[in-house]
Image (cartoon, grey):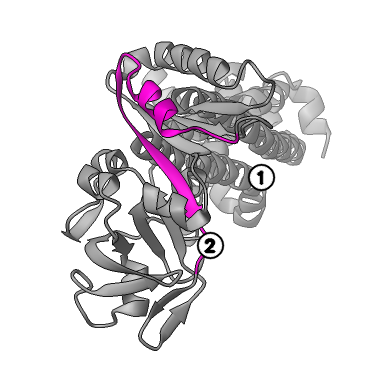
Amino acid sequence: MRKGAIFSQSVRMSLKNIRSNKQRSFLTMLGIIIGVAAVIALVTTVSGVTSYMMDQFTGMGAGSLTVSAYGTVMKSGLTENDLSDIAAIDNVQGISPSIDVTAKVVRGANVSQDVRVTGKGERYFVKYNNLIAGRALLASDMAGNIKVCMIDQKCAKVFFPGENPVGGTIRIKGITFTVVGLCKSDTGIMSEINGTGSAGDDGDIYIPYKNALRMNGKNSVNSLEVYVKDTQGTDEVETELKKLLDSTFNNADNAYNVINMETILSTMNTMENVMTGMLAGIASISLLVGGIGIMNMMLVSVSERTNEIGLRKALGANPGIIQLQFLMESIFLSAVGGIIGIIIGELLSLLASSLIGTAYIPDAFAVLLGFGFSVGVGVIFGWAPARKASRLNPIDALRSE
């Protein structure tokens, strides 16, 4: 008999046996289905979440350094001269101080203390262009201490419902500010890290940082972002910045902290790889359990069909054909279980993405890993039962009834 015919016959007999034991075949596949679904769902979901976080970091922090100046007993923060020195560092595109203001915000009968009021420099709005209407805060607003502000969409709904807020006025800590711009509400992960997200339910207001300093009764800055022109030179800028800050605070311990977003991005990449590997490893345990289930079922099948095997061998069936038939059964069960697991895993990933608000990004690596692993399990755990069937003595097999 030709090899093609032998293979075709083995496939038909394998499928026939699987169909004749539907319930047992399904229960045998269940471990593979759960294992593959877990691998797909976990790896794809983690990949989607990490991709979302990386996009947030890249969009909000790539090419920037965040400085937290804790100060010393002699020097509480960074003065205007210090800020000028930082802005003069080679390869620095600009800087933006950040000052939080605790204030009651009032417009007519609307009063709120759930609005985050933040003082920012003009370079912040050049770096993060989220303007919807009007204009951003300008350098002239900083220099002239002009009482102007930008508000986000959430804040506009609270204080200017159904109105265009640009040109309107609002009172912050008893001081009247004119709204010159409307910007998008920032609710991303990086918004909280950079201090730009909504702290309360009523949105954000941005004012010139010098106004914020006066409202807080301070003359020094404790937080700022440094924007780098060429991101390839971010590390060099960080080194020069730390030298300057050491000199500013007389080499005092714990006087400041500098966060390099490029370093965070690299760390997150490493964490993603480690986490994905760990989750895939944990989920793969289910595949191993499924493989043991397949081996157990195939051994039971060999025992139940001992007479059939003995009769076929007595009639001249090649041991290799019998081994191939049982091995094909094992591979079919694991492959079909793998396909079902992939479908379920992708559906779970889609559901998880919609629940946590991240983009659904199919992971081809996870699909290939899950399917390849399931077929591999079928081959490995099906080989021993198939070999046992092929090595049965026909006389003993016929006598076993």
Q: Indicate which disc residue 102 carries.
A: 2
Amino acid type at image mark 1: Gly
| Quadrant, the N terminus | top left
Report which residue position mark 1 lands on.
Answer: 31
- Image point (27%, 73%), residue name: 169
Could you tell me how many numbered marks the image carries?
Answer: 2
- Image point (51%, 44%), residue name: 193
| Image marks 2 and 1: residues in contact by CB distance under 8 Å | no
Q: Residues within 10 Å of mark 1 (few under 14, many from 20)?
A: many
Tell me where the magenta segment starts and ends, as one range.
76-103
Q: Nearer the viewer, residue 184 or 119?
A: 119
Q: Residues within 10 Å of mark 2 (few under 14, many from 20)?
A: some
Q: Indicate which disc residue 351 carries.
A: none
Q: Is residue 387 magenta?
A: no
- Image point (49%, 34%), residue name: 371
Q: Nearer the viewer, residue 202 or 337?
A: 202
Q: Is there any visible trace of residue 346 in the rendered image?
A: no
Amino acid type at image mark 2: Thr
Q: Is there any visible trace of residue 132 in the rendered image?
A: yes
Q: Is residue 79 left or right of residue 373?
A: left
Q: Is residue 130 above or below residue 266?
A: below
Point out residue 292 in the picture as x, y percentages from the top left corner.
Answer: 73, 35
Q: Nearer the viewer, residue 198 or 51?
A: 198
Point out residue 19 in the picture as x, y percentages from the top left corner.
Answer: 54, 51
Q: Secondary structure at mark 1?
A: helix
Measure the C-alpha gap from mark 2 to mark 1: 56 Å
Q: Quadrant of residue 146?
A: bottom left
Point out residue 163 in the picture as x, y percentages from the top left corner.
Answer: 21, 80
Q: Is residue 102 magenta?
A: yes
Q: Is residue 284 left or right of residue 176?
A: right
Q: Nearer the viewer, residue 350 or 194?
A: 194
Compare marks 2 and 1 and give the one earlier in the sequence: 1
